Amino acid sequence: MKLPAHRKLKGRNLIGRNLQRIRYAHDPAITLDDLVARLEIRGLFLSKSTLSKIENRQRVVLDFEVLEIAEALRVPITQLYGQK
């Protein structure tokens, strides 16, 4: 049985755990609602549910989404990939 393409990619997002860690590291922590609002200002419309799926590595993240998320969090894009 051949798996659908989206099932093959499950768990293959590299930034999820770092995204959550970075959000919590801010003082005060950045909530998913806060991040949704920051992204909307930048023209990227991701729901709270979608961001949660990204953090739990249940959704693949596109390159332009990673860029916008990094800028919304005010961190270098490399930090989302676990580099300093």
Image (tube, grey):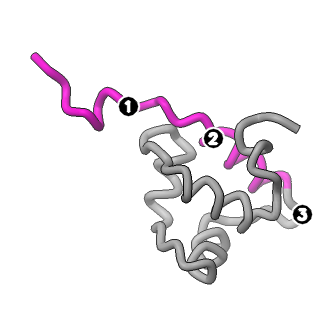
Give neighbour class at mark 2: few <14, some 14-19, many 20+ (Cα, 10 Å): many
Which residue in the protein does label 1 denote? 9
Task: Determine the secondary structure under disc 1.
Answer: loop
Q: Of label 3 and label 2, which has the lower sequence position?
A: 2
Asked whether the residues under the numbered discs 3 and 1 touch, taking CB atoms below 8 Å apart as contact, a structural biologist would say no
Q: In the depicted view, which residue is nearer to us: 74 or 54?
A: 74
* Marks 3 and 1, how far apart at CA: 33 Å
In the image, farthest residue toward the left: 1
Residue at the image point whose x is 58% and y is 72% from the top: 36
Q: In the depicted view, which residue is nearer to us: 21 or 15?
A: 15
Left or right of residue 5, residue 11 in this image = right
Which residue in the protein does label 3 denote? 27
In the image, farthest residue toward the front: 64
3 vs 1, front mark: 1
Q: Which mark is residue 33?
A: none
Q: Position of residue 2 (x, y in %)?
A: 14, 20
Which residue in the protein does label 2 denote? 15
Task: Determine the secondary structure under disc 3.
Answer: loop
- The residues colored magenta run 1-25
